[in-house]
Image: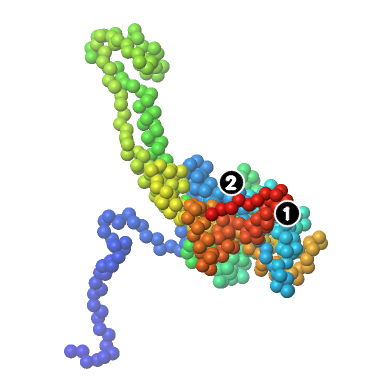
Amino acid sequence: MNLNPFRRRKPAARKSVRSFFNGASTVARLSDFTPSYASANVEIEADMARLRGRARNLANNDPLVNRWMQLLELNVVGHVGFNLQTRARNPNGGMDKYGNDTIEKRWRKWSETATTDGQMTMRAAFQMAVRTHARDGEVLIEEVVNNKYHDSYGLRFIEADQLDETLNEDNHQGKGNVIRMGVELDQQEKPVAYHLLTSHPGDNTWFKGGRKYRRVPADRLIHLFKKERPGQVRGVPPTAPVMGSVKLLGGYRDAEITNRRIAASKMGFFTKEDEKVDGLGTIADTVDDDTGKLEMDVEPGKFTELPQGMKFDQFNPSSSGTDYADFEKQIIRSIAAGLGVSYNSIAADLENVSYSSIRQGELQDRDAYRMIQKFFIERMANRVFANWLRYAMLQADFPFPFSRYNKFLDASTFRPRGWAWVDPSKEVSAAVKAIDANLTSMTHVVGEQGRDIEDVFEEIESERELMKTLNIEAVATE
C-alpha cells in the first residue's frame, strides 16, 4: 500500500479513443478522405498557379463557366454600373443641390476614362473586376496619381500572376515585416505593400529581363479577394470546388458525341463465308491505301446485292440512351450549387419548371448577387471614389475647397442595379400596403428596383408638366 502522497504513480495504459463524429472515422470507405492540417496560405501557395490556370481554361472553353461569368456581369454590374448618389446638406439642413449635382457630374466625367490606358469607363472597370474575380479569385488594381490623367487619378489593372506567390520572406529588411506570397505584412498581419513582378511571367519578354520586382504601397493598390480563413492573404478561384465536375461533364459529352458520330458514319463490316470467293472487288468503290482493304459507300434507300459467299455484319455501337440527359442535369445541378446559382439560370433550362419554382430560384439568385454587389461597393467603389474625390478637389478648376471633402464623402453612396418585379401585380400591391402601414418607405421600394427616388419624382413631375402643356389628361386607374 502506497502511503506517500508525493510518489508518482505509474500512468495507466492509454486506451484508443473512438471517433464521436462519422466524418472523423477511419473506416476503409473513408480511407481516401484526405484531411488538411496546413494553414490557408500553405494550401493556396501549393495550388494557386494550377488552379488559376485551369480556371482560365474553363473560362475560355467551357460554356457553363462562361455562362456563369456572364450572369455575374449582367446581374452584379448590369448595363449602367454602380451609380453615385450624393446627398449632402447645407448648414440649415436643406439639400445642397448645386454641390451634389456638381460632384455627381464631375464623377461621371472622370468615369468616362477611368483607367490609365484611357480605354475603359468605370462601368467597364467594374465588369472587368467582377469577371477577373470570378476567374482568378482575386483582383489587383493599382491607383496611379499623375497629372496626365483626368483629375490626376487613374486605375491600372494588373494580372494576379505578377504578384509572385513564390516570394516569401521572414523579417523583411530587418523591419519585422514578413512577405507571404508577394504580400508584405506587418506584425498584425495588415498588408503594408505588394511586391509585383515588373513583367508578366507569361510574356515573351519575361526570360529576357529576368525576375525583377517593384514595391507598391498598400494604400496604392486595391486587392480584392474573398477571405475565407484567418491569416489568408491571397484569393482562390471560385470555380475550384466544381472543376472536377465540369471536366467530368465535358469528358462525358465528348465520349457521347464521339460514340454517336461513329454510329452515324460506320454502318458495318463485310465478312467472307468462303475464302475461295472473289469478295467485293466487283462492287467496291475504293481501296484503303494503308490496309489494302476494299471499302464501299452507300446511299440512303439503296440496296446492293452482295457477291456469293459474302455476309454483312451490322455495326451498332452501344449508346447511353435516354439516361444521358438525366445524368447531365444532375452534374449541372452540382455545378450550379458549387457556384451559388440556380440550375435553371446557369443551364438556361426552363423546361417543365413551374412559376413558383422559377420565382424562388430567381429570388435566391438575386440575394446572392446583392451580396456580391455589396462586396464590390465596399471594397472597390467606395475606395476609388474617396481617393478620386481627394485629388479632384485639389484641382484648380474644382469649385469647392478641400475643407468640404468630408461633407461630400460622408454623404455619398453607390446604388447598384436592381431588378424588375417577378410578379408585378402581387408585389406592387404588397409594396403599397407596406408603405401605407409604415412598414417600409417609397425610397426603399424604388431602391430595390435600382433607381433613385428623387429621379423618379423628377420624372413624374416632368411628365405632368408635359401633359399639361400638351393638354393631355391623365388616365385614371383603379
Q: Name the residue under label 2.
A: 202
139 is higher (above) or lower (below) than 300: below
Q: How far apart are marks 2 and 1 (CA)?
A: 35 Å
125 lies above or below 374:
above
Q: Is residue 305 left or right of residue 126?
A: left
Please tell me which residue lies in front, 336 or 202.
Answer: 336
Q: Where is residue 280 in the image (x, y as percent from the top left)?
A: 32, 11
Along the polypeptide, which appears first: circle 2 or circle 1? 1
Rendered-image quadrant of the C terminus: bottom right
Of badges 2 and 1, nearer the viewer stands: 1
Furthest residue in direction right, as rendered? 396
Q: In which quarter of the image is residue 28?
A: bottom left
- 144 vs 79, nearest the viewer: 79
- Element type where label 1 sits in the image: helix
- Which mark, residue 84? none
Amino acid at pointer 1: Lys
Q: Nearer the viewer, residue 196 or 23?
A: 23
Residue positioned 28% across, 67% down in the render: 20
At 22% from the left edge and 92% from the top edge, which residue is drawn? Answer: 3
Residue 451, quarter of picture: bottom right
Q: Quadrant of residue 222?
A: bottom right
Q: Name the residue under label 1.
A: 109
Q: How many labels does the image show?
A: 2
